[in-house]
Image (cartoon, helix red, strand yellow):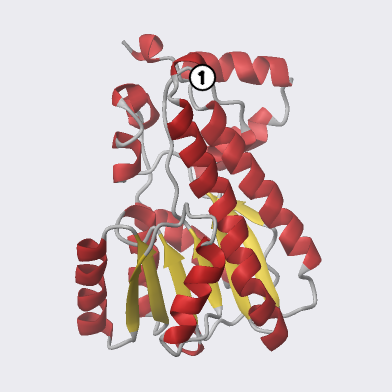
Amino acid sequence: MTVDYRSHTVLVTGASSGIGAAFATALAARGANLVLVARRAARLESAADELRRRYGVRVEPVPFDLALPSAGNDLRKAVADRGLAVTGLINNAGIGSFAPFLDADPERLAAEIALDVLAPVRLTAAFLPDLVSNGHGFVINLAGASAYFPSPRMAVYSAAKAFVLSFSETLWAELRGTGVTAFAVSPGATATEFTTGMGPEAGVLTAGKVRRPDDVVATALAHLERRDPGPSVVDGRTNRLGVLMNRLVSRRLSAAVMGRVLDPRTHG
């Protein structure tokens, strides 16, 4: 479909770095106004200044902790107080950890669920009614290739991404005919700060060829611009092939294979 980005105000979470920052740049270059959300206020303000200068669009930085239970309503109010009406929502913010479940910090796992699962649900619930009421807009949720695989050492993270994938695909079906598009984009290993924050052994995730944030964004926006976007898209040919092959084997074999792939000793 034809997307006139100049008619959109897009809220991007996790916008201070990585894939979120790449979304912000790509959308600003296309003429969209932006609401950038992340916890790092100084970095967010710097990014907003740069986008305004380069592209002449309105960019509102909103430092915010998306793990708060009231995140959806509070953020919706913060946007309304700035006189903005969001027409596009990109739920990109997330954290992960890389360790056997028995060794993981329960508080860290709870934080993963809050940010990776609850925040997208809360924000979508807060902003979607206005999108549907206006018959115009989109919701893009960041799932991940790990949503399709059992992922030993990333038990909670991969389960969270599986939730996001299922949630997004269900929204896609429910929103047919409303004028609002919803889908999930699933990156694999991507060159961002995200992996370094998962722990010292998470380097196995980027041991091979990795995608760039710009690649992921290009995949997502190309999907959005299709005549009839589907409920989900996997970024990168290798990742798409891996997802396809995984569907052809048993869950037992898939879990065993991924256990070896994600074992740091295998790469030692």
Comparing 207 with 9, the one in front is 9
- Position of the C terminus by quadrant: top left
Quickly name the residue at label 1.
Answer: 101
**Residue 120 in sight from this viewpoint:** yes
Tell me what residue is drawn at x 59 percent, y 82 percent: 2
- Residue 149 horizontal/vertical position (percent): 61, 30
Q: Relative to 56, is 180 above or below?
A: above
Q: In the visual, does 122 lie left or right of 172?
A: left
- Residue 70 horizontal/vertical position (percent): 54, 61
Which amino acid is tagged 1? Phe
Tell me what residue is drawn at x 71 percent, y 85 percent: 133
- Position of the N terminus by quadrant: bottom right
Question: Which of the 4 image quarters holds residue 3?
Answer: bottom right
Q: In the visual, does 39 lie left or right of 114?
A: left
- Residue 211 horizontal/vertical position (percent): 38, 45
Q: Relative to 109, is 212 above or below?
A: below
Q: Relative to 264, is 28 above or below?
A: below
- Residue 129 horizontal/vertical position (percent): 69, 76
